Image: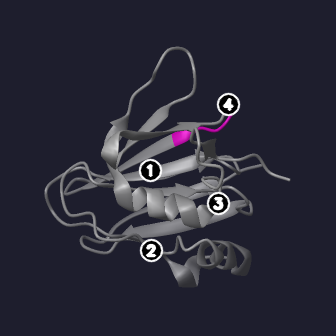
Amino acid sequence: MGRKPFAAPGCAGWHSGAALVLAALLLAGCDEPRGDGPPVLELEGDRTVRLDPGVELHDVRIGMDGVRPATVRAGPGDVVRFIAADSRTHAVAFISEELTPEARSFLERTGQLRSPPLLAEGASWIVSLEGAPPGRFPFVSVSGDERGVVVVER
């Protein structure tokens, strides 16, 4: 059994990958540390999601100057947030033909193979690595061909 990526008070089902994708569509703000606890993701409508202890949030900014950082090293269960760093429209897609069958299956099963359009600066998409197999997850910003890779390590 893996660890849950996060839990929102009063939202028992928020730990699934599909719920993460839905939450990503609503994501409107930045994480704001509150006290000494794990990061908090601010969602539209004054809702927040606090990451579980031990789960790391990895931010990837996508803009005219490329992908920063271009390589993200994460553990299974971590969360990756792709953020539009400029006002251009961006969409992130994992490169299906470069994924292992296990990685492709994981992303397809969790509905995380491609982001919705990120229409404004600061718009973001969250990917949960809960249950992700170890390996390389190459991705591209389809609007500008900026590339990067998420490396899931044990």
Choose between 130 and 152: the one closer to the eye.
130
- Tell me which numbered mark, 2 or 1, is placed earlier along the sequence: 1
Question: Residue type at mark 1?
Answer: Arg
Left or right: 127, with 75 as reference point: left
Q: Nearer the viewer, residue 77 or 98?
A: 77
Three-letter code, disc 3:
Ser
Rounded to the nearest angstrom, the CA distance separating label 2 from label 3 is: 17 Å
Q: Residues within 10 Å of mark 2 (few under 14, many from 20)?
A: many
Residue 45 higher or lower than 126, as above or below: above
In space, the residues marked 2 and 1 are separated at their CA atoms by 13 Å
Q: Secondary structure at mark 2?
A: loop
> Circle 2 is placed at which residue position?
114
**Residue holding disc 3:** 16
Q: Is residue 116 left or right of residue 109?
A: left
Q: Residue at x 55, y 61 (%)?
A: 19
CA–CA distance in space, label 4 to label 1: 17 Å
Q: Classify residue 75 as left or right of residue 9.
A: right
- Give the class, few, some or many, for how many residues have Cα within 10 Å of label 1's Cα (few <14, many ≥20): many
